[in-house]
Image (cartoon, grey):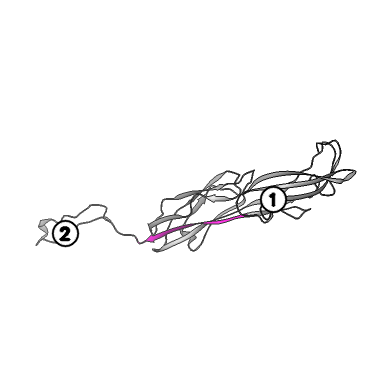
Amino acid sequence: NNSSVSILITAHTVLSGPAGIWSFQGTAGYCIVGTTVLAPGATCSTFFGTRTLATPGSYSATNQISYQAVGTPATTYTVQQAYTFAVATTTASVGSVAFGNVATGTTSAPQSFTLTNNAVNGGSLKNLSITMVGSQPANFPMTHSCGAALAQGASCTVTVSFNPTVASGLGASVRVFGAYSRMVAGADTCITQFNGVNFVVPVTGTGTSPVATLTSASALAVPATWYGSAAQTVTATY
C-alpha cells in the first residue's frame, strides 16, 4: 500500500490466461478478499495456481486486485499485474535406442542418453524413478546416475546394454516417473499436488545364433603327400 490511508482488498480475479489458471487468495499473509486491510506501507502476497494446467510450455496471465479506501467504500480501485510462467517437463535426449544384431550369450557395447529437467523458477523433479519395463526387460541391463530428484536445469545419464538370451527380436522400455509440485485449490484453500512425468524410451535389439569362425588360419593347405599315404590330422581353431 503506497497510499497514506488503509485499504481493504475487495476482489481478486484473473483477467486473462490459459484455462485452468486461478488466482490464490487464501490464508494469512496473502491478499484475502473482504478480510485483508493494508495499512500505509503494508503488503500482502498473491500468486497463480495451475490447477488442471498440466501441458508443458510457457504461458502468460494477468491478475487483478480490487480495493477500497477504508471508510470510503463508494469508490473501488484496481491494480493489475502480468505474469509469465512455465509448466515444467523432463525430456530424454533420444526417442529410442537400437542395438541391432548381437550374438546370444554376449553383451553389446553400452549406449547412453541423458534426462534433462527443463523447469524454470526452481522446479525440481521429485520422486524420480527409472526402471526397465516391457516384454523382455531382463535382456537389457540398465544403470543410471539419477537420484530421487533432479534439480532445475540438471541432467543425469541412463546407460543400457543388450544381452540377448534367445535368437529373436527383443524389446523393452526405459520408463521415467517423476513429479513437479503445483498448486490446486479453490478460492480460499491451497493443496499441493503434482504434474506427473511419465514417459518411456523404447529399446530394441535382435539376438542372433553364434556362428563359428576360423581364427587360427585364413586357409588350410593340404600336403601333396596325403594321396595314398596313411591318414593325417590337421587341427584348426574356431
Neighbours of disc 2 within 10 Å: few (<14), some (14-19), many (20+): few
Instruction: Please name the amino acid that badge 2 sits on.
Output: Gln
Q: Is residue 188 left or right of residue 101?
A: right
The location of residue 216, given as percent across then percent down, is: 25, 52
Query: Image quadrant for the N terminus?
Result: top right
55 horizontally vs 136: left or right: right
To which residue does mark 1 refer?
Answer: 16
Can residue 48 be seen in the rendering of this structure?
Answer: yes
Q: Which mark is residue 232?
A: 2
* Image-based side of 9 in relation to 93, left or right: right
Residues in magenta, as a range: 196-209
Q: Is residue 84 above or below residue 2?
A: below
Residue 138 picture location, percent across and down: 48, 59
Question: Which residue occupies the foreground of this view, 30 or 65?
Answer: 65
Picture coordinates of residue 168, whole percent (x, y):
40, 64
Q: Where's residue 181, x and y in %? A: 67, 51
* Horizontal arrangement in the rendering, residue 191 relative to residue 132 (left or right): right
Q: Quadrant of the C terminus?
A: bottom left
Q: Is residue 24 visible?
A: no
The question of residue 206 being in magenta is answered with yes
Q: Residue at x 77, y 46 (%)?
A: 65
Q: Secondary structure at mark 2?
A: loop
